[in-house]
Image (spheres, grey):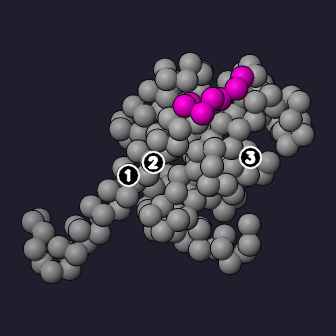
Amino acid sequence: MENSLEIKRLENLHKYQILDTPQDGSFDEITSLAVKIFDVPIAIISLVDTDRIWFKSSYGLDIDEIPKEPGLCSSAILSDDVYIVENARKDPRTLTNPLVTGALGLQFYAAAPLITRDRFRLGNFVIIDAKPRRLNGKESSMLIQLSRIVMDRVELQLEARELVRDLNNRGLAQS
């Protein structure tokens, strides 16, 4: 990604003040739903930061973040479309990835980018399986829809913070 564009993307990510925030039941509900919809063991809402990929919500995974390199999410945000790896053990993009070769044994990965209203990609809505599989058009569409629902929630949280800040600046917020 072009350096100035990446700087703007990171500035936009930090504007949302979502990194390193506590668990949020509404996001956890969405990842839980994705596991059921797609019949996969893992669903993640990931945010791609400077040197890490931080998970706002993860179902089926007990970690909060992974290094940015060689993370799949940092590749997936380069596209406006769903990024799919049907069989990671045969896909040249993922053959040496530690998520594939390590204990997780990832074989299937699909991610829809989390895109802001200003068209910046903050991260991805991800589904993962330990066995190879395909994602049909209807499933790709549902994954994109889930990513949009997540972004609607993120945008609403930003708007609420900005409203409270404006009210405080005007002296209208209650103590």
* Residue matched to label 3: 71
Q: Residue 78, how many percent across, how many down? A: 69, 57
- Point 68% across, 78% down: residue: 4
Amino acid type, residue under disc 3 in the picture: Gly
- First-in-chain label (1 vs 3): 3
Q: Is residue 114 left or right of residue 95?
A: left
* Residue matched to label 2: 148
In this rendering, the label closer to the viewer, 1 or 3: 1
Q: Are marks 2 and 1 in contact (CB under 8 Å)?
A: yes
Of the 4 image quadrants, the one containing the C terminus is bottom left
Q: Magenta region: which residues?
A: 133-139
- Point 45% across, 48% down: residue: 148
* Residue matched to label 1: 152
Q: Residue 41, how many percent across, how many down? A: 60, 21
Of the 4 image quadrants, the one containing the N terminus is bottom right
Is residue 169 visible in the rendered structure shown here?
yes
Q: Is residue 42 left or right of residue 153?
A: right
